[in-house]
Image (cartoon, rainbow, N blue to C red):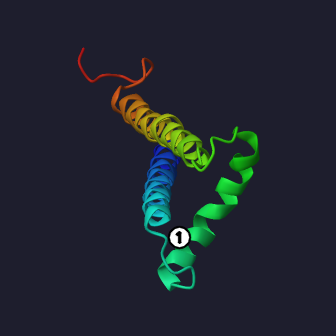
Amino acid sequence: MILLGNFLIAVGQLLSSLVTLFIFLLIARAILSWVNPDPSNFIVRIINDTTEPLMARVRPRIPNFGVLDMSIIVVLFGLYFLQSFIAQSMVEYGYVMKRSSIMNDAVPAASEPSGIY
């Protein structure tokens, strides 16, 4: 159980780190949309190419508010939910699994002699 607990902790922390990176990319995309940078810039292309697939899936489902693209807010809320609920739950469940496994190993079974008579 310790191995599975460590695996859940590692996957949860990796997922949380990836979500944090994606949140930073979305914030950078929002800032870049205000300054209208050169679209052929390498960094701008990386940010747009990384964030556009998720934004394109959400954009048709959100009502249009003129020039404001509200899909970025919906995606940010979804990512915060993923990070705080799913990833954090995986990490905490991994720690619970490790703790319970250690506690079960530390307590002697009732059938084992204690050595005191």
36 vs 64, left or right, is left
User: How far from the left and from the top, in percent, is residue 78?
Assistant: 57, 40
| Helix, strand or loop at mark 1 | helix
Of 34 and 62, the residue lying toward us: 34
User: How dense is the environment of label 1, judged by Cα within 10 Å: few (below 14), some, or many (20 and up)?
Assistant: some
Relative height, residue 43 to residue 101 (above, below): below
Residue sitting farthest toward the top: 117
Question: What residue is drawn where x is 48% and y is 41%?
Answer: 80
Relative height, residue 116 to residue 4 (above, below): above
User: How far from the left and from the top, in percent, is residue 63?
Assistant: 70, 38
Of 69 and 104, the residue lying toward us: 69
Q: Amino acid at mark 1?
A: Ile
Question: What residue is drawn where x is 45% and y is 62%?
Answer: 34
64 vs 13, left or right, is right
- In which quadrant of the rendered view does residue 110 lie? top left
21 vs 46, left or right, is left
Residue that carries the numbered disc 1 in the rendered image: 47
User: How far from the left and from the top, in percent, is residue 104?
Assistant: 41, 29
User: How far from the left and from the top, in percent, is residue 88?
Assistant: 45, 39
Residue sitting farthest toward the left: 116
Residue sitting farthest toward the front: 66
Of 9 and 77, the residue lying toward us: 77
Quadrant holding the C terminus: top left
